[in-house]
Image (cartoon, rainbow, N blue to C red):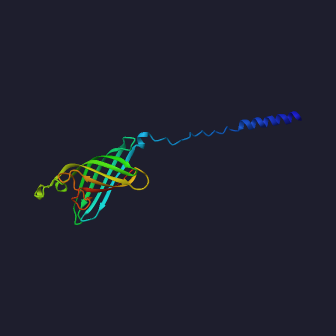
Amino acid sequence: MRKIFLTITLFICAFTAFSQEEEPQEKEKPDFFEQPKPAWKDKLRYGGNFWLGFWGAFYIDVSPMVGYEVTNKGTVVGLGANIIYQGVFNGGGDFIYGPKLFVRQPIFRSIFAHAEYEMMNAYSNNFYSFNANTPVTDIKKKWEGSPLIGAGFYQGRQGQRGSYLALMYNLGYPNRGFISPQGLGGNNSPIVIRFGILL
């Protein structure tokens, strides 16, 4: 009887062991860690200026900028574009556009110096070089460039990043350069207000 019981027990154990399928083991998932940013991405700066006006005409200025920090002191060198639409309320409007090069240097805490050279494509009466005696039929679009220099400050506590306010002076005044509707104290002013963001 003992032999029969032992044989049955062995038979049951063997049957149970062979009848159970081996459960597939879950593959180990690799741990994904956030890869550190390459050093060059930490030095990339992007943003731009934005301006919206309604005095006398509708005016919108969107000027994207991208730059790269080239020194340990925070000097940023970059490229940008000016894209402006000026329209009058009774209809009609004009697109003004052009590229620019810029350099921005931190001075103290959130204060910075800024210089740029902009090329603008606009009707000739939008430049300081315009001759008021020019017949209306001779007013055509043209390219003209001018250097601007100024200073500004970043708002908030982010140091040399974030939204900023700057005053720029058009060094081409009164002989050349685009007459910005953002001029301080009137449309013919060489002092231009800039509001934007640089991250």
Looking at this view, name the residue that lies furthest to the front: 108
Q: Does 34 sit left or right of 16 as displayed?
A: left
Front one among 128 and 93: 128
Q: Position of residue 10 (x, y in %)?
A: 80, 34
Q: Does 32 sit left or right of 140 as displayed?
A: right
Q: Does 67 sit left or right of 20 as displayed?
A: left
Front one among 188 and 37: 188
Front one among 86 and 16: 86
**Residue 55 higher or lower than 199, as above or below:** below
Q: Position of residue 12 (x, y in %)?
A: 78, 37
Q: Does 191 sit left or right of 42 as displayed?
A: left
Image quadrant in which the N terminus is located:
top right
Total number of numbered labels? 0
Q: Position of residue 36 (x, y in %)?
A: 48, 41
Looking at this view, name the residue that lies furthest to the right: 1
Residue 62, image quadrant: bottom left
Q: Position of residue 82 (x, y in %)?
A: 28, 52
